[in-house]
Image (cartoon, grey):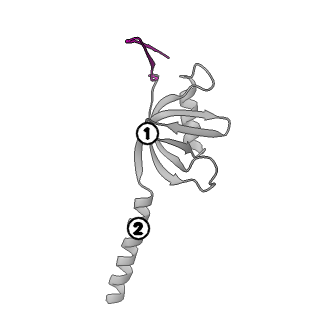
């Protein structure tokens, strides 16, 4: 009986640790996909994106919003943040699990001169 309880406790500990590592979070940021690389940039983060079917699907959805090849498009995704196994490029990468939304609303750049605020795209 004790062995069963110990095995069960170890199993729960292992499953608990695994689910913590694979925690999916919602991220809002600007997405760009160029050739075989993708990036998601938020107000306080920048992540490389695992180029898989979900990333390619998101790239396809953002194409119609791009005016130029290097336009970054606002998106909301559910993703898992991981350490970059390649150690070159971004320190952390994300794997997109779900595409929540793609937006046409780009952040307007703001310039302030002599107390007058200008904004544009």
Q: Secondary structure at mark 1?
A: loop
Q: Residues within 10 Å of mark 2 (few under 14, many from 20)?
A: few
Q: Secondary structure at mark 2?
A: helix
| Residue 71 quadrant | top right
> With respect to residue 28, does 82 lie above or below?
below
Question: In the image, which disc is placed on residue 44?
Answer: 1
- Determine whether label 2 and label 1 are within 8 Å by CB: no
| Closer to us: 55 or 70 | 70
Q: Position of residue 63 (x, y in %)?
A: 58, 26
- Residues shaded magenta: 105-121
* Cα distance between the residues tagged 2 and 1: 31 Å
> With respect to residue 44, does 110 lie above or below?
above
| Residue 1 quadrant | bottom left
Q: Position of residue 109 (x, y in %)?
A: 47, 20
> With respect to residue 119, does 91 lie above or below?
below
Q: Position of residue 85 (x, y in %)?
A: 60, 56
| Closer to us: 93 or 91 | 91
Residue 107 forms part of the magenta stretch = yes
Q: Residue at x 62, y 54 (%)?
A: 87
Residue 103 forms part of the magenta stretch = no
Question: In the image, which disc is placed on residue 15?
Answer: 2
- The numbered mark, 2 or 1, whose residue comes first in the sequence reads 2
């Amino acid at each position: 009986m004790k062995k069963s309880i110990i095995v069960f406790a170890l199993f729960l500990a292992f499953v608990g640790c695994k689910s913590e590592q694979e925690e999916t979070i919602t991220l809002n940021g600007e997405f760009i996909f160029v050739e075989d690389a993708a990036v998601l940039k938020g107000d306080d983060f920048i992540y490389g994106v695992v180029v898989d079917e979900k990333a390619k699907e998101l790239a396809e959805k953002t194409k119609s919003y791009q005016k130029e090849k290097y336009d970054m498009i606002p998106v909301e995704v559910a993703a898992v943040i991981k350490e970059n196994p390649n150690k070159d490029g971004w320190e952390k990468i994300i794997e997109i699990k779900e595409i929540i939304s793609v937006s046409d609303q780009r952040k307007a750049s703001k310039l302030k001169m002599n107390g007058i605020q200008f904004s544009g795209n």
